[in-house]
Amino acid sequence: MNTVQPIRDAQVISQVKKLLLDKGGKYYIMFVIGLNTGLRVSDILKLRAGDVRGKDHITLTEKKTGKYNRFLINVQLRKEIDDYLAGARLADDEYIIYSRQGENQPLSRIQAYRVLNSAARELNIADVGTHTMRKTFGYWHYKQYKDVAVLQDIFNHAAPSVTLRYIGINDDTKDNTLKDFFL
């Protein structure tokens, strides 16, 4: 499996959002939730309408780690979720990111990957997969707050160095030091 990267350009994020909205509201909301919570795609896909409707937080036991976690649904994300739920007319027990295969089934990770990768190819973006959402959240959160400890806690990482490597900050730092270096 190839390593994916965060999306480091805000304009590209907007372009991906537009493409995903054109493909379907469920793909758009999947991307928006991923970008604004840092949740893994496996946890996003298991969310049901009742998990977010009228709630201030997304609370869940992470599929990968088995750890309980709690994510704030801020005002902007609340509006996006409310708009999506109103249009999708989902009952509380229905999956937000639903599959057309079977009754009330979540979208598969493979299909989520295909949709994101297709949008990336249309925009000529390399190194994009489902984990790109989580890494993009981390990258932009770190750029805004410069608090690796909080981000480490959000991601449940063991060390700050793991978090910085994960979101590509180490790569950016190395590239910047080598950009003008020549002997």
Image: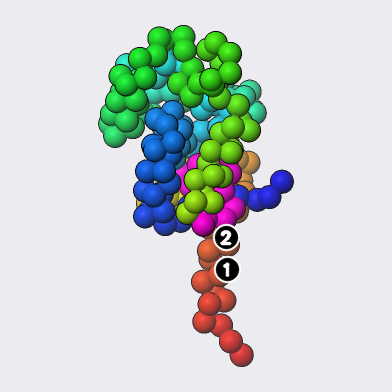
Please say whether residue 152 is visible from this viewpoint: no
In the image, taking residue 1 as reference, residue 162 lies left or right, namely left
Residue 83, percent from left and from top: 29, 25
The kind of residue tagged 1 is Lys
In the image, taking residue 109 as reference, residue 95 lies left or right, namely left
**Residue 110, relative to residue 53: is it above or below?**
below
Mark 1 lies on a secondary structure that is helix
Name the colouring of the figure.
rainbow
**Residue 161, relative to residue 37: is it above or below?**
below
In the image, taking residue 53 as reference, residue 180 lies left or right, namely right
Residue 92, percent from left and from top: 41, 10
Residue 140, percent from left and from top: 42, 50
The stretch of residues the image draws in magenta is 124-137
Quadrant in the rendering for residue 99: top right
**Residue 8, relative to residue 183: is it above or below?**
above
> Which mark identifies residue 170?
2
In-front residue for pair 173/150 = 173
Which image quarter is the C terminus in? Answer: bottom right
Residue that numbered label 1 is attached to = 174
